[in-house]
Image (cartoon, grey):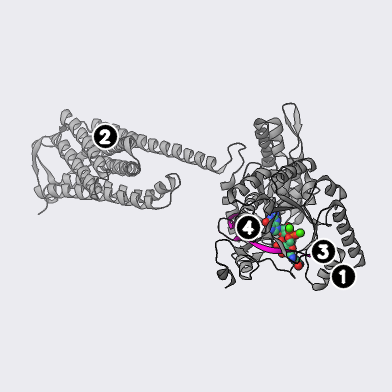
Amino acid sequence: MSVFGCIVYHHNLWLVLLAVMICGAGSWVTARLVLRAFATQGMQRVGWQFLTAVVAAADIWCTHFVAMLGFEPGVPVAFDPVMTIASLLIALVGGFAGFVVATSRIMRAAPALGGAIVGLAIALMHYTGMLAYRVEGIVSWNRGWLVTSIVFSVLFSALALQRAHVAHARAERGPSIGGLADRKSAHAAVPLIAGILAFAIASLHFIGMTAFQVEPLALAGDFTNPAALHALALAVASMALVIAGAGCVSYLLDDSVRAESVEHLRTMAMSDMLTGLPNRASFNARIDAELARTDDPRQLALIGIDLNRFKEINDLHGHHAGDEVLRILARRLQSLVREDEFVARVGGDEFVAMQRFATREALADLLTRLETALYRPVRYDDAEVTAGASLGVAIYPDDATSKTVLINNADLAMYRAKADLTHAVCFYEPAMDEIARARRSLAADLREALARGQLSVYYQVQTSISTNGICGYEALLRWEHPRHGFISPAEFIPIAEENGLILSIGAWVLREACLRAVSWKPPYKVAVNLSAVQFAHADLPKLVETTLAETGLAPERLELELTESTIFADRERSLAVLQRIKALGVNIALDDFGTGYSSLDTLRSFPFDKIKLDRSFVSDAESNRQTTAIIRAVLALGKSLEIPVLAEGIETQDQLALLAEEGCDEVQGFLLGRPAPLDQIVASGQLTIAGEAVGAAAS
Ligand code: C2E
Ligand code: CA
Ligand code: CA
C-alpha cells in the first residue's frame, strides 16, 4: 500500500518547475563557489565558504518554500513566520558549517563529512519548514519515507562535496599558470557536482513530501487566496535567483580580476622593464615555438644585434642618457617589425630580431630597416648621439638545425661584424666563424686549465758554443687538453692574452720555473717568457720581486725573455718597467730578434743581457746567402754592443757549425735538446735536484 494510493495532492506544476529551476541554478552556483573555496586559503577561503553557504541556503530554502507554495493539499494553509525564518537560519548556519568542514583539509574524509553536514542541514531546514506549515487537517508522517529522505539528502550531499574535492585535487596536480589553468580544469566537474547537489535537495523535498500526509478537516472551498501565495512564490523565487546571481557575479568578477592579474604578471615576466620590448624569456619562448613549427616551409633568420657605442654613450653622457637611448632605439625597433617578425632585448645593449622569410629580398629589407633605425642619431637633451650596431645573421635550417647552434652562429657572425668596421651586417660563414668558435671553446677550456692541473712547464737547454757547456734552460709552457691532447703555446698564448688569462698563467709559470730552478745543481739560469699583456697590466717588477723572494731564487739566475713588439706597445713605460726589473738583478733577453722591427734603436735604448736570434734565420741560413749575411750582421751588432747572441732553432750539426764559425755565443734547439719535463732532464743526467740522491736522478 502506498501513500499515493490514499491521498492525492495537487501540485501547482508551474511552481514545482520554478522550484526545480531554483534548485538547479542555485546548485550550479554553489558548485562553482565551493570549488573556489577549495582552491583558496585563509580569510579568502572563509569568505568563499560564507558566500557558498549563503547561496546554498538561499537555494535550499527557496526551493523548499516555492515548492511548498506549489503544494496544494486542498485545505487552507498558513506559514508560521518564526519557524519559517528559523528554517532559513538553519540552512545558512548548517550550510556554512558543512562547507567549512568540507573544504578544511583536516582529514581525508572531511569533504564527505562536510557534505553530510550540508545534507543534514537541508533535511533539518526542510522539516523545520514543515513545522511552520500549518494546514487545516490531520497531519501524519510516514516514518519510512521520512528516514529515506534524510538518508538521500545526507548521502548525495556528501557525494557532491566528495566529487568537488576530487575535481579540485586533480586540477591542482595538473599544470597551472597563476592558478588559472587548474581552476578551469576543475570546472569541468561543475555539472556533475551541481547535479548531485540538486538531486540531494530535490529528493529530500519530494520524498519528504511523500512522507507528509494530511487528512483534510474542512472541505474544499475556503482556501487561502492562491493568487497571494503565487505572488509570494514568485517573490521568493526572484530572491533566490538574485542571490544565486550575486554569487555568480562575485565569482566571475573575481575570476576576471584574477585573469587580468595573471595576464599582467605574464606580460611583466615576458617583457623588458626598461624598454617594454619582449625580453630574453620571451625570445626563448618565441624561438622554441618557431623551431617547433613544421607547417611553415619558410626559413627563419635570427639576427643578433649588439650596439657599437653604447658604453661610450654611457660613459660620456651618463646612465640616464644610456637608458634613454635604449628606450628610443627599442621604440624604433618595435615600430619597424611587421608580420612574421620579432624583436627582443636580451641583454644590456643586446637585441635580437627574427624573421620568417620566403625571399632573400624580404630578409634584406628587414636588415635595412634595422640598420636605419639603429644608425639614425638619437637626441638626448641637447646632444645627438649615434649608437650604431653590429648585426650577425644566421639562418635556420641552412646554418644550424638546433636552437643553441643557431643562436651561437648568429653571435659568431655578429662578432665578425663587430670586428669589421666596414660592415654593420655579417652573415654566418662556417669557414670564418668556425675558427672563432674553436677559439672561443678553447678560451673557455683554458679558463679551467690552470685549476685542473693541465698546464705544465717544459725546459729546453741553452748551450754555450765556446765551452760546450750548459748555461741555462728556457721554461716553455705546455697545455695538455683533456680532449685535444697537447696544444701549442703558439696557439693558446694569444687566446690567453686576448682574455687576460695570461696574467694568472704567466704569474704561475714564473713562480713554477723559479721554484724548480732553486734546487738545480749546478745552479743554471732559467729563462721565462713574458707576454706584452703582462707588461701592460700587471705590476711586473713587483711580481718578479715577490716571486724571487718567495721562491728564494737568486735574481741573477732568472732571465726574462720579451720581444720587441712588447716594448713598442708603450715604449716609455716599457723601458721604465725594464729598468726596475733589471735593478732587481734579473737578466733581460730580447726574444725573436730579426722578426719584428729589429731596430737598432731598441737595442741602444736598453742594456739587454742577451739577444735571441729568431730560428727562422737559422733554418734559412744554409740555403740562403742573404740570411747568412743577416746572421753575420746581428752577431756583429751584438759584439759591438757587447751583448751575447743566442741562436734559436738549431736542428743540425751543419747549422751549429755555421753559427760557431760566425762567432755566435750560445745555441738552443732540438739538436742540443728538445723541451722536456724536468724529471726527464734530471733522468738524462744533465742536472740534479738538490736534496735528491744523484743515483736516483740517474736511474
Ligand atoms: P719562443 O719563446 O720563441 O720559444 C721557442 C720555441 O721554439 C718553442 O716553441 C720551442 O719548442 C721551439 N723550438 C726550440 N728548438 C727548436 C728547433 O730546433 N726547431 C724548431 N722548429 N723549434 C724549436 P713552443 O714551446 O711551442 O713555444 C712557442 C712560443 O710560445 C714561444 O716561442 C713563446 O713565444 C710562447 N711561450 C711558450 N711558453 C710561454 C710562456 O710561459 N709565457 C709566454 N708569454 N709565452 C710562452
Ligand atoms: Ca722565448
Ligand atoms: Ca724565440
Please tell me which residue is depicted at 76% across the width and 56% down the height of the picture: 360
473 displayed left or right of 161: right
* Residue matched to label 4: 517
* Image: magenta residue range: 447-466
Q: Where in the figure is residue 652, as x and y percent of width and height?
A: 79, 72
* Residue matched to label 2: 233
Q: Secondary structure at mark 2?
A: helix
For marks 3 and 1, the one nearer the N-term is 3
- Asked where in the image residue 123 lies, by quadrant, the reply is top left
Q: Where in the figure is residue 171, as x and y percent of width and height?
A: 38, 51
- Asked where in the image residue 258 lies, by quadrant, the reply is top left
Q: Where in the figure is residue 362, as x and y percent of width and height?
A: 74, 52
User: Residue 94 lies in magenta, yes or no?
Assistant: no
Q: Are the residues at dot 4 and dot 2 in contact (C-beta closer than 8 Å)?
A: no
For marks 4 and 2, the one nearer the N-term is 2
* Along the line of sight, the residue nearer the viewer: 7 or 69: 69
Q: Secondary structure at mark 3?
A: helix
Q: Nearer the viewer, mark 3 or mark 4?
A: 4
* Along the line of sight, the residue nearer the viewer: 122 or 275: 275
* Residue matched to label 1: 622
Find the distance from the CA under tag 4 to the CA under tag 2: 109 Å
* Amino acid carrying mark 1 in the image: Glu
* Amino acid carrying mark 2 in the image: Ala
Q: Nearer the viewer, mark 3 or mark 1?
A: 1
* Amino acid carrying mark 3 in the image: Ser
Please tell me which residue is depicted at 63% across the width and 56% down the height of the picture: 513
Q: Nearer the viewer, mark 3 or mark 2?
A: 3
Q: Nearer the viewer, mark 4 or mark 2?
A: 4
